[in-house]
Each structure stands twice: as C-alpha cells, then as structure tokens.
Amino acid sequence: MNVSQKVINNISRGIEDFVTFLGDKNELEENENQRLAAVREKMIDPEKTRKIAEYVETLYQENKKYNLIGPADRNEIVYLHILDSLIPLFYAGRLIEFAGKIGIDIGSGAGLPGLIWSIVLPESTVYLLDSRRKRVDFLRETVSKLNISDCRPLRVRAEKLGQEEDWREKFDFVLARAVAPLNILLEYSLPLLRIKGRALLFKGPRYQEELEEGDAAAALLQGSREKIFKLEIPGLEGERYLLSYQKEDFCPKKYPRRVGIPEKRPLGSRS
C-alpha cells in the first residue's frame, strides 16, 4: 500500500506533542513520569505507526465511496479521529493495564477507537461491534488487509450480545465513542463487563447534562462512576472527555432489555 510519509510523521508528531504537553503540565503523580515514558515507548513504534497510517489511507479511500465518517482529508482523519482515539490511553490506565485484556468497542463504525487500540495493543483481543452491514464489511476487509490478528468485527446489536451467555460479563473493558446518551450506553456496556471491568465512554462538553441519569442507570446495573478525564489534545479544538465507569457486581439478568427498549425507556430517566 502506498502510504504517505507525511501521514506517518503527523501521527508520530501528534503523539510526541501530547507526551511533551502532558509532561509540561507538572500535574503527574509520583512515578507517573516513568509510566508516561513506558506508554510513549509502546505507542511510538515504527511498525504500529505505519499500520495506523495504512488504516488512514484505507479509510480515506473507502470514505469517499461509503461516507463512513463524513467529509475528511487525511490530515483531518489523523487529528480528528486517530489522535482523538489514541490519546485517552494515556489517561485511562496509562495503556499498560489493558495489555493482554479482552475489550469490545460498541458502535465501532469505521473502527474508531477499537481498531486503533487493537493496533497499539497487539497482546489484547478487541471486538468491534456494529449492527450495520456496510460498516462491518469495511471492518472485516480492513482487519484482514492490515493483518491485525486479534481484532474481531461482529455484526450484532449490543442488547442481544449482552443477553447471550457466551458473551455476557466476558470483557475487561468496553469502549464507545459518540454512540448514545450515557444512560442508554451504560445499559449496553455494563452487562458485557466482568466485575471490576471498566466502561470507557468518549463524550463531548454536554456530558454533564447526562450525568445524573447516567449515574442512576449505573446503580441499577451494579456499576459506579469511577472518574471523568478532561482530554486536552494539542492541535484539536473543542472539549473532550472520557468517562470511566466500573462494574461492581453481577448485573441483574433482565438487563440489557430487548432491542429498542433502552432507547424508548432509558434507565434512570426523570421523564
């Protein structure tokens, strides 16, 4: 595949700029500088960077045909999608905690963030969940083309998967980026998590409007809000947040409810 050196450089530079930015903030806890250096070494890897660049080129070409992410040139894909998917790894467990774990990306779409996490975490198994055939076909072709061994697209609804014995409470982490309101998203996510597993949910600046109902839903599902990370990414405008919820106990068997019900009658809703 013909991969632009400019794209490779932009990916590497974006991560380097963020490492420098985070280190300069002087807000790291004791021993965090060592952990930050370990994450940087794991992420700034020529083979991984080239594979991400190959993904950027594949997505750029396919997006022109299928509108997977809306209009975007290669540089916009790098900053608005790749770095936006990668940077939370520095906040949420400093990446190392997810190595060798099993995760699932709900509503993966074009593979963001799950496919990118899979490239950076080759020791982990990451499932890419989406109900739309066009997107799952793209994911399967891309995973095969890039030879990402433990990245596994699935075409099924989260509500159905969460009620299947072989999948329920199987995962160490759940990812979701721009999928649904918080209380709905937690009903999709928490039944899939093992006890002490984490749901890592990407949100914009209006997340606070969803917190009360989201926390109420989490309590019904035997989960609790762990932390809110404000994601500051050099070169990107707009506020970004990562909400972390932890699974505390077994989820009641009636959740998730059947397809469509979480959206029609959201848990924790005041209305």
Image (tube, rainbow, N blue to C red):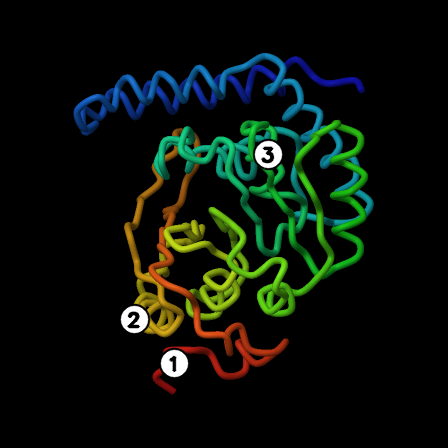
Q: Residues within 10 Å of mark 1 (few under 14, many from 20)?
A: some
The mark that comes first in sequence, 2 or 1, is: 2
Q: Residues within 10 Å of mark 2 (few under 14, many from 20)?
A: some
As helix, strand or loop, the secondary structure at mark 1 comes to loop
Residue under the image location 67 percent in, 45 percent down = 110
* Cα–Cα span, label 3 and label 2: 32 Å
Answer above or below: position of 138 versus 218.
above
Residue under the image location 31 percent in, 44 percent down = 230
Quarter holding the C terminus is: bottom left
Kindly identify which residue carries mark 1.
Answer: 269
> Which amino acid type is shown beneath numbered disc 2?
Glu
Where residue 212 is drawn, which disc sits there? 2
Residue 86 lies left or right of residue 76; in this view the side is left
Q: Quadrant of residue 30?
A: top left
* Cα–Cα span, label 2 and label 1: 9 Å
Q: Nearer the viewer, mark 1 or mark 3?
A: 3
Kindly identify which residue carries mark 3.
Answer: 118
Where residue 115 is drawn, which disc sits there? none
> Which amino acid type is shown beneath numbered disc 3?
Ser
Residue 95 lies left or right of residue 147; in this view the side is left
As helix, strand or loop, the secondary structure at mark 3 comes to helix
Residue 78 lies left or right of residue 141; in this view the side is left
